[in-house]
Amino acid sequence: MAPPGEKMFRIMISTDNHLGHEERHIVRGEDSFRAFEEVLDISSSHGSDILLLGGDLFHDNKPSRECMVKTMNLFRKYCCGSRECMVDPVDVTAMGNPAYPDEEQIVNYQDPNVNISLPVFIIHGNHDDPCGPGQHSALDILSSCRLLNYFGKQANVNAITIKPILLHKGDVKIAIYGLGNIKDERLAKLFQDRNVQWEIPPDSSEYFNILVVHQNRPLREGKNSFPVEKIPSHIQFVVWGHEHECQVEYSREGNYDVNILQPGSTTITSLVAGEAALKHCFCLDIKFNPESQDHKFRCKEVKLNNVRPFMYSELTLEGNCGATEADVREYLEREVEDLLERAKREHPNPAPGMEKPLVRVKVEHTGFHIPAPQRFGEAFGQGQTAENWRVANPDDILKGWKRQKARQQVGQKNPAAAEEEEEEEELELDDDDEDELLDEDEELDEELLEELDDEEDELDELLDED
């Protein structure tokens, strides 16, 4: 891809990198870092003016020291250098930590003490959101080190103001509005109570306006989400983080005139159907058309190669195999073998270190008994050294679920018909639900520890008085 030149603004886009995911895993430990390094390499080699990240850079809210060191080394390797930044920061007051309003608001490449060749702009997601005294995120550490530019943090989550970063390059003017993740229930209430304000410059029509969010999409039925109808009409392009399925084509939501790009994650964190799609980052080129006095854009996907192959299938045992446990095991093992053969065909030259694929078989086993996942994985390397593994997740290949009969409702006219109806229901929590429960447990643990600390302080004071 040719460099953008002076009259084109090039933005490389990526979201949900989840650095540190499974970092202790003997096979998958480096997966998230390898994929993100490829994003940085592509951004640098394609001459991008900026790299825009849509949240969840880290998988854990408090990344390990090893994870932080690896991340900082990657940013220093690909984002620091002598290449001149051609982007003029006109207004960057949307950056920084609202808890410290007196801090100087500048982009990292304006700091004379560092040489930045690839500016990175980022919002936080639900995994790396700010918390604790001062409302700091792991991203604040990287921002303080001038390795990236963190924006989209709110000073008051009960009344939020979304303000843009204004960037110029020649005749091209870009406004980037960012909203770091807020609990979807809270955000829905804020919109309902009209406590969301958009700070729109008076000359916004002269800009190409981008919105970066990290929330549930309205496509998720039964869950609160960011309402597309609340996006101001002057926004032309939306980068939607949090959803891990990579959608290569940007789309429009309903009848609303806004282009929505869902880049998806760069590494596989959940063994679900949406993660089986190929992973990409995206190159957004923007030019100003002097004849029509507006901006034209082109968005092109760039396939990521340093991603572990993931083979996924769903099947039903009823009518497809015998009733004995031996029949079930043979049928399931044959399905996994077919997936491994398919992986060889579809990924003939996997990246170094990515040779062992991830495999997930989701089994509907109503009326059948399936083997325990770890016991089933013994046929594919479980219990052996990692060199002998045939898959990257031998202890986690199977996921079973059963249908449950619908409960009879009071006053139902035809209970016999209702008894015959069946609804599909997961027996296990999905990963998002698990994350929410874990987050709630962590918050409760932190509150309990704070209460214990306060009680210990009071006890120390009493002892000192005595």
Image (cartoon, rainbow, N blue to C red):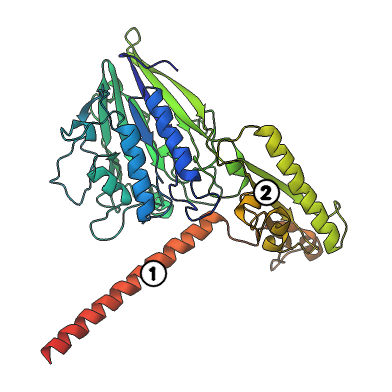
Q: Is residue 67 left or right of residue 153?
A: right
- What numbered label is drawn on residue 390? 2
| Residue 319 image offset from top left, x and y in percent | 86, 52
Q: Is residue 326 above or below residue 388?
A: below
- Local secondary structure at mark 1: helix
Q: Is residue 124 visible?
A: no
When asked about the image quadrant of residue 65, the answer is bottom left
Residue 340 position in % (x across, y down): 71, 43
395 w.r.t. 71: above or below: below
Name the residue type under label 2: Arg
Residue at point 30%, 25% (across, down): 174
**Residue 463 vs residue 33, the one in the foreground:** 33
Classify mark 2: residues with Cα within 10 Å, few (<14), some (14-19) or many (20+). Answer: some
Relative to the observer, which residue lies in front, 234 or 241? 241
The residue at 67%/54% (across/down) is 397
Whether residue 376 is visible, yes or no, is: yes
- Residue at image position (47%, 52%) is 23
Vertical side of 343 occupied by 364: above or below: below
Q: Mark 1 is on which residue type?
A: Leu
Task: State the mark number for residue 444.
Answer: 1
First in residue order: circle 1 vs circle 2: 2
Residue drawn at point x = 40 percent, y = 45 percent: 57
Asked if residue 317 is positioned above or below residue 11 in the image, the reply reads: below
Left or right: residue 23 compared with residue 169: right
